[in-house]
Amino acid sequence: MEANRIIKITEIQSDQRIDKFLAEQYPGKSRVFWKNRIENGCVFVNGKTAKPTYKLKTGNEISIAPEIESETSPAAKQKYETPKINIIYEDSNVVVLDKPAGIPVHEASSYKGATVVDFLVEHFPGIKDIGEDKTRPGIVHRLDKDTSGVLISAKNNDAFQFLKNQFKNRLVQKTYTALVYGSVPDDHGAIDLSIGRSRSNPKMQTAIDSKKKTDIKAREALTIYNVKKRFKDYTLLEAIPKTGRMHQIRVHLKALGFPIAGDKKYFSKKYAKIEPKPERQFLHAGKLEIELPALGKKTFTSEIPEDLAEFLDKIS
């Protein structure tokens, strides 16, 4: 007899209604579809039935009956051409990619097209069984769809746990290049503001001063930044996130008063008249320092993409 599909909830996925979460996981199936299936006892949380309004918690295990999985298969995403992605490094345990902008790491209800996961599964078929969530096999960290740069993935379960533990214990150093609107006054600084889901838009994050009282569930977040170059109306920064919250650099820099150039989600109207603007958010994951299984500490780098380099030339 075929086993139920299991989805283990991560920190980032927590605090969502289960019916909404499943609708996002399965493009083409509505919240109403999942509400009905949950109420009919076809979806379980930690082995027990749940209500459609149940708020997910970190570590929850959602199991979905095989017959419901088969219902979703006709609506599985269409075949798209696998994206071309440069491989920076590869061994028997890991693969390091130079992710282009415009391609999400894994599927989502808001995006219909090819993903980094599609590339990984096509080039390394064994990856499809790696990790805790079959929709994002081998993935131990993410970059936003419109962020380019270094991305590492595990090729076996031992490597997955090895890498995951490093991210969890904050032993990985990620360095980004970010161009922001405005003139950042200090050459160096730290943004120490907790981050939680926005009340007005659950798809967005918001920065919160932990000293102030709020009913928003938030987690500590810290970003270090260094000014690299100043332009008229812009500042080029090196940003180093010490924690791994969703949209962290984008949210923190907006909270500082200097949102990332070209970022349409975390934008400030005070900079609306600045021209020119980049066509996408100016955020690039240029360096990743991490320990690899049996190889020790390694550093991987990615040159700033041509579109961002050309924009810097334009504003120089």
Image (cartoon, helix red, strand yellow):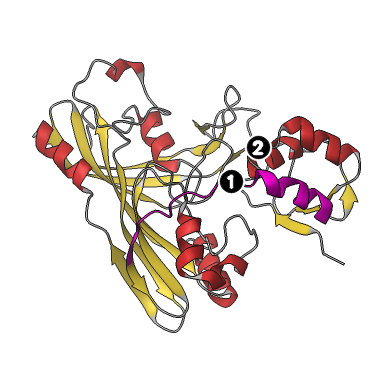
Which residue in the protein does label 2 denote? 28
Horizontal and vertical percent position of residue 218: 59, 38
**Mark 2 or 1 closer to N-term?**
2
Q: Is residue 160 left or right of residue 297?
A: right
Mark 2 to mark 1: distance in Å? Answer: 8 Å
- Answer yes or no: is residue 124 visible: yes
Q: In the rendered structure, which amino acid carries the disc numbered 1?
A: Lys
Secondary element under disc 2, as helix, strand or loop, is: loop
Please tell me which residue lies in front, 264 or 187. 264
Which residue in the protein does label 1 denote? 77
For the residues labelled 2 and 1, say whether their Cβ atoms are less than 8 Å apart.
yes
* Callout 1 crowding tier (Cα within 10 Å): few <14, some 14–19, many ≥20: some
Q: From what the image shows, is residue 266 above or below residue 40?
A: above
Secondary element under disc 1, as helix, strand or loop, is: loop
Horizontal and vertical percent position of residue 19: 75, 37
The image quadrant of residue 129 is: bottom right
* Callout 2 crowding tier (Cα within 10 Å): few <14, some 14–19, many ≥20: some
Identity of the residue drawn at 35% across and 58% down: 85
Identity of the residue drawn at 63% across and 45% down: 13
Please tell me which residue lies in front, 33 or 7. 33
Please tell me which residue lies in front, 292 or 238. 292
Identity of the residue drawn at 38% across and 25% down: 267
Please tell me which residue lies in front, 71 or 245. 71
| Tag count | 2
Identity of the residue drawn at 39% across and 46% down: 223
Q: Over which residues does the magenta segment extend?
A: 65-87
